[in-house]
């Protein structure tokens, strides 16, 4: 009797489990399909090349934290870095990747490296000007007319010397990547000239030269952490912000910003940093592996960033963002108004460094 009454109950549970299993499989397949579609938007992660690197027999755990989101070119670069380091160390170095400032914003992450509680980060150079004043050169407006000139400077003698100079204060600087050209967005009006910026509250990074740029243009610059920015835009604490197209889209700023102006006013790199405390624990062979992986990550991340740039700008237009493209004459007006910034910062940054970069630009 017991068997007869329980049998239909068991059958119903089996059928329910079967339906649930089918639904779960379909959901997983659907998510996999969506992931595959998203992945096709970016250049594929390259295969790892190079022999396995012999270490010292010890295992190492490496936490790598960035401020941008999981859909950014920078995080895609981190995925490649992880692949290189784990494969070429034969698993003796395990890399944990963190996005969206999960372990802190740029400055908090740098402090964690100095304290030895975080192994790696890759901040924009802009928030680090207080530590390394020469980094302000990357914040000078309209200094890098093309991405190719930026590559030439960063990968050449100038950029390599700057990495050496930044390998102090508990940090080891091992490579460059690309944040890219910054564009202005806001919720108030289409900006075509400096006069349109009068009184506009523009979020900036915690960087004195950025404050100087926007004050000079007549705006009201408001420094704040990137992690706080979306909420500040949504609530009207600030009217606008400036970041590369890929960051604007991946952070969904277009949901709270109607207007954008393609200014290309500042080219900003990312600098790849390692905690000196962690670095000194590594055998020399693993130190070299991290340097090689950082270089490969940076080259690939630039490729991803530039591949997506025009595509993303078009997508933002299709999603309803009003994008203004400045004429050469309009850009010249911004440049003329910003000339005092060069005068103010020449001695602080180093006139020789500025002149060397301009010489590289003219030789292109």
Image: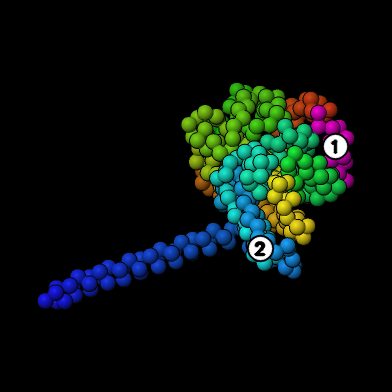
- Residue 172 visible in this rendered orientation of the protein: yes
Q: Does residue 77 appear to the left or right of 16 in the view shown?
A: right
Residue at position x 19%, y 70% from top? 9
Q: Does residue 310 appear to the left or right of 167 in the view shown?
A: left
Magenta range is 348-364
**Colour scheme in the image?**
rainbow
Above or below, 255 relative to 97: above
Q: Position of residue 301 (x, y in %)?
A: 68, 54
Q: Does residue 30 appear to the left or right of 72 in the view shown?
A: left
Dot 1 corresponds to which residue?
A: 353
Report the front residue among 13 and 126. 13
Mark 2 Cα within 10 Å, few/some/many (few <14, many 20+)?
many
Q: Report the predominant secondary structure element of the magenta stretch.
A: helix
Above or below, 289 relative to 103: below
Report the front residue among 290 and 178. 290
Going from the N terminus, do you reach mark 2 or mark 1 first? Answer: 2
- Residue 260 visible in this rendered orientation of the protein: no
Residue at position x 72%, y 68% from top? 52
Residue at position x 58%, y 50% from top? 98
Q: Position of residue 125 (x, y in %)?
A: 71, 40
Q: Position of residue 362 (x, y in %)?
A: 86, 43
Q: Which residue is the extreme one toward the left?
A: 1
Measure the alpha-carbon separation of dots 2 and 1.
Answer: 40 Å
Residue 92 marker = 2
For residue 81: magenta?
A: no
């Amino acid at each position: 009797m017991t068997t007869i009454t329980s049998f239909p109950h068991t059958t119903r549970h089996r059928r329910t489990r079967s339906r649930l299993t089918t639904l779960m499989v379909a959901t997983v397949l659907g998510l996999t399909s969506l992931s595959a579609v998203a992945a096709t938007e970016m250049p594929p992660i390259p295969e790892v090349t190079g022999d396995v690197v012999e270490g010292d027999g010890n295992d190492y755990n490496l936490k790598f934290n960035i401020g941008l989101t999981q859909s950014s070119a920078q995080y895609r670069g981190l995925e490649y870095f992880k692949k290189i380091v784990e494969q070429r160390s034969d698993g003796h170095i395990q890399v944990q990747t963190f996005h969206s400032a999960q372990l802190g914003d740029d400055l908090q992450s740098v402090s964690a490296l100095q304290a030895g509680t975080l192994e790696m980060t890759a901040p924009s150079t802009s928030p680090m000007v207080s530590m390394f004043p020469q980094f302000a050169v990357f914040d000078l407006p309209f200094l890098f007319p093309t991405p190719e000139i930026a590559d030439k400077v960063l990968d050449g003698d100038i950029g390599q010397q700057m990495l050496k100079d930044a390998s102090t204060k508990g940090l080891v600087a091992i490579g460059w990547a690309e944040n890219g050209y910054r564009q202005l967005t806001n919720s108030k009006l289409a900006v075509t000239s400096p006069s349109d910026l009068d009184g506009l509250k523009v979020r900036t990074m915690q960087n004195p030269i950025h404050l100087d740029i926007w004050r000079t243009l007549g705006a009201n610059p408001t420094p704040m952490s990137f992690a706080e920015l979306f909420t500040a835009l949504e609530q009207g604490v600030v009217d606008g912000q400036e970041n590369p197209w890929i960051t604007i889209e991946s952070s969904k700023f277009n949901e709270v910003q109607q207007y954008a102006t393609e200014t290309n006013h500042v080219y900003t790199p990312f600098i790849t940093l390692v905690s000196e405390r962690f670095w000194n624990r590594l055998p020399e062979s693993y130190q070299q592996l991290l340097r090689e992986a950082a270089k490969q990550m940076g080259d690939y991340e630039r490729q991803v960033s530039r591949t997506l740039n025009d595509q993303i700008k078009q997508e933002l237009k299709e999603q309803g963002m009003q994008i203004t493209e400045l004429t050469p004459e309009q850009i010249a007006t911004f440049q003329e108004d910003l000339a005092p910034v060069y005068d103010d910062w020449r001695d602080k940054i180093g006139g020789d460094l500025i002149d060397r970069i301009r010489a590289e630009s003219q030789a292109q």
